[in-house]
């Protein structure tokens, strides 16, 4: 007879708790090679993962960025100096008009706060990217062009103070003239055919006749104006070569004032540059009590009240001219335009308008002329009116200053320092 417990199911042994020492039993010579090979393989895989994770981004393969692809119906504009006063306003307008924008700025004069404002306004992927880089570094510039599919360049980046240029002329020739050459070489290498160049009325010097037309001879009298004219000459010479086939627009603009009418951007120069900055910034600093008063340099010019006469153009009108120039740019064609209101205002008139806009009786002290300044400059905007259908709309000096003052009052410390996205 079979045992009676034969029909009962056998009980399984309780689950065994495996320890690492049991899994890797080196006491068994037959099992040792198998476990050793597994350990070696695991160690190699771990080392490879660590190596990949610690490599710089440039050595990893990633999905192509939308900024690196030419997309039908989308114009990708490189805005150099886009963290600066004018460049940031231009970037804002381009983004509002559905352009794709890459800003390159070394932040030596620009403000990361302006970039943060733009990033917050246009957070959608593929709209805006910011790259912190110096245009004086050809390798960095070439890499930027190689990794991005630009359709056009708006070149604003430049140091831009007349008085400072007389103190540091070599810096101005490097920053303006040499850096423009670097940008042009990168454009030529990477087949970017459209350039909108930010120039200045300072290239004219002190013309014998007013108003200034585009045919007025250029005889700049300070390093700022000379450096800009040299950059213009380089651009024009290159554009004439058969190899170039470029669309070039050069905008020579006059004294810029104002700020974004919706209060999102404004002028925020570094404190150490106030001495060289625009008269509007000095007026606002005096009204805010940051400086004790306004210094007007030069009261013996041959003008009705002895102070300099300038053509003040609102920044909103100025960026509108840039966008219209971009839209009208044609391959094989060069356009040169003065951007101004066509009306000159004296410094004393400006100060009175600033007092009215701020409601503050600003203290004014008068000093000798500033080196490199000229007596009277205002434009004839007939050509840009006719060819680009552009006319200055914000011509009320008091209103432009009131809008700018509204931003200044709300930003006592200028832009707050945000976290920057640096690519």
Image: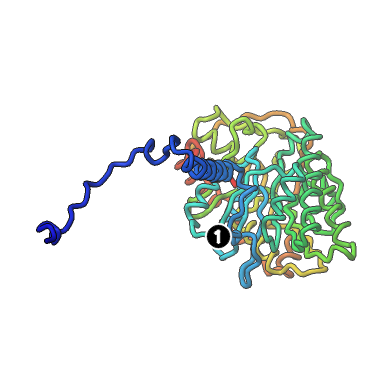
Viewer-side residue, 423 vs 374: 423
Does residue 314 appear anywhere in the picture? no
Question: Looking at the figure, which quarter contains the N terminus?
Answer: bottom left
Residue 58 left/right relative to 168: left
> Residue at the location (54% across, 35% down)?
285
For mark 1, what is the residue?
127
Relative to 91, does residue 48 appear above or below in the rendering? Answer: above
Q: Position of residue 268 (x, y in %)?
A: 57, 40
Q: Secondary structure at mark 1?
A: loop
Along the line of sight, which residue is nearer the eye, 362 or 46? 46
- In which quadrant of the rendered view does residue 146 lie? bottom right
Colour logic: rainbow
Q: Residue at 74% across / 67% down in the picture?
A: 329
Quarter of the figure with residue 213: bottom right
The reply, left or right, for residue 258 in relation to residue 381 is left
User: Residue 194 location, x and y as percent?
Assistant: 74, 63
Estimate the x, y position of residue 341 in percent, counting from the top left: 67, 57
Q: Residue furthest left?
A: 4
The picture places residue 10, in percent across and down from the top left corner, at 18, 55
Is residue 29 among the parts visible in the rendering? yes
Count of numbered marks: 1
Whether residue 73 sits left or right of residue 402 in the image: it is right
Q: Nearer the viewer, residue 60 or 97?
A: 60
| Front residue of 126 and 45 | 45
Residue lying furthest bottom in this view? 72
The 10 Å Cα crowd at callout 1, few under 14, some 14 to 19, many 20 or more, is some
């Amino acid at each position: 007879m079979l045992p009676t417990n034969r029909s009962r199911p056998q009980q399984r042994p309780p689950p065994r708790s495996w320890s690492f020492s049991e899994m890797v039993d080196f006491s068994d010579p037959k099992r040792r090679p198998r476990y050793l090979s597994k350990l070696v393989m695991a160690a190699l895989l771990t080392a490879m993962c660590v190596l990949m994770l610690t490599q710089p981004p440039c050595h990893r393969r990633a999905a192509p960025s939308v900024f690196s692809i030419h997309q039908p119906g989308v114009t990708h504009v490189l805005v150099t100096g886009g963290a600066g006063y004018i460049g940031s306003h231009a970037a804002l307008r381009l983004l509002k008009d559905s352009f794709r924008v890459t800003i390159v700025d070394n932040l030596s004069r620009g403000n990361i706060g302006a970039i943060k404002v733009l990033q917050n306004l246009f957070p959608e992927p593929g709209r805006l990217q910011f790259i912190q880089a110096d245009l004086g570094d050809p390798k960095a510039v070439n890499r930027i062009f190689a990794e991005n599919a630009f359709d056009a360049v708006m070149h604003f980046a430049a140091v831009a103070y007349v008085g400072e240029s007389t103190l540091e002329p070599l810096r101005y020739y490097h920053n303006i003239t040499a850096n423009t050459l670097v940008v042009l070489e990168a454009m030529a290498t990477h087949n970017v055919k459209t350039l909108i160049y930010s120039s200045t009325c300072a290239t004219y010097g002190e013309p014998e006749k007013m108003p200034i037309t585009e045919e007025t001879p250029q005889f700049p009298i300070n390093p700022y104006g000379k450096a800009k004219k040299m950059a213009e000459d380089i651009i024009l010479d290159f554009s004439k070569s058969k190899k170039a086939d470029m669309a070039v627009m050069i905008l020579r603009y006059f004294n810029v004032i104002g700020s974004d009418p919706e209060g999102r951007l404004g002028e925020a120069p570094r404190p150490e540059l106030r001495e060289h900055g625009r008269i509007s910034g000095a007026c606002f600093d005096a009204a805010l009590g940051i400086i004790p008063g306004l210094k007007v340099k030069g009261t013996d010019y041959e003008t009705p009240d002895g102070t300099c006469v300038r053509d003040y153009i609102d920044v909103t009108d100025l960026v509108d001219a840039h966008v219209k120039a971009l839209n009208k740019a044609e391959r094989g064609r060069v356009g040169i335009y003065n951007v101004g209101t066509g009306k000159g205002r004296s410094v004393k008139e400006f100060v009175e308008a600033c007092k009215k806009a701020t409601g503050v009786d600003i203290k004014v002290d008068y000093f000798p002329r500033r080196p490199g300044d000229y007596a009277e400059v205002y434009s004839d905007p007939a050509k840009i009116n006719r060819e680009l259908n552009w006319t200055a709309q914000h011509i009320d000096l008091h209103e432009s200053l009131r809008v700018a003052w509204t931003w200044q009052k709300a930003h006592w410390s200028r832009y707050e320092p945000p976290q920057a996205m640096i690519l």
